[in-house]
Amino acid sequence: MFDTVDLHSLRAHRQAQITVDPEAREKARHKEELEYDLIRHTDETWVTSSVEQKLLQEKWPEKSIQLISNIVDIPGSSTPFELRRGFLFIGGFQHTPNTDAVLFFLKKIYPMVKERLRAAKFYIIGDKAPPEVVALAGENVVITGLQRDVRPFFESVRLSIAPLRFGAGVKGKINQSMAFGVPVVATSLAVEGMELTDHEDILIADEPEDFAWALIELYESEELWKRLSENGIRKTRSLYSTDTAREKLEPLFSDQHLTSLGASLRETADRGVAIAAE
């Protein structure tokens, strides 16, 4: 079984398109060769998003491609709209899409946001922010570094942003924010394959001006904030909870499914003995 986590080659191809870098294109092709070789030589492949499942099913209709998405704890929201201030981005900077997203936001979107929301602080949570991000910090742009406990941030901010321009898979930053009842403004790529509806579960905007105004609208509208907060928790519970994961995983470890992939009765029996021993 090959658990992709996300399709690295898809993310790499998208990065190459954004950067227009021949070396990046070559790296993307290499990642694709590695991933496709693994898919060809394993009995089953797991992906986290419906988009990636469809992509692989179209390429390998004879293979078992299963959708097993992220699993998150869902603490919910405990702080009302009127007591919340500021907004955040969360993600480690070893991951290139996060660096690109923060720089894109600070350079292209944030100047429009701060004209309207002058007192709102923007918290950038994540390890190893590069010098080009640190250089853009200021009174209302706060780089927190790695935080072992992010709960205080999610319990105090009004919203979270995911201005990603390339990537793949299901975005944990969106899962985590919605699980805390913190509404999200995101690009269409960031929500790809997450089964989220614009203005019901999340706000989606791609162009800098549209993104800025979506953020401002959500920051100022209590009615919109409450709707997205409640629907976000509900959608996260239905798609990304431990109960949902259990319902999807249990059939995949059944004797019937394993034998359909070519496992022998002896192998499935041994698996049962091993599980019982645990």
Image: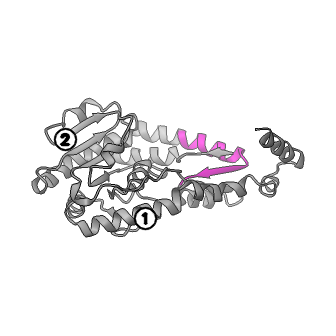
Instruction: Identify which residue is drawn at 52% across, 47% down.
Output: 6
Image quarter where the N terminus lies is top right
What secondary structure do most residues of the magenta stretch adopt? helix
Instruction: Identify which residue is drawn at 33% across, 62% down.
Output: 204
Residue 141, numbered circle: 2
The kind of residue on which mark 2 rests is Val
Residue 194 visible in rendering: no
Q: Earlier in the sequence, mark 2 or mark 1?
A: 2
Residue designated by label 1? 196
The magenta stretch is 31-48
Which of the pair 85/255 is nearer the observer? 85
Percent position of residue 152, x then y: 32, 43
Please identify the quarter of the rendering in which residue 184 is found.
Answer: bottom left
Instruction: Identify which residue is drawn at 53% across, 51% down.
Output: 71
Which of the pair 186/209 is nearer the observer? 186
Percent position of residue 167, x then y: 42, 48
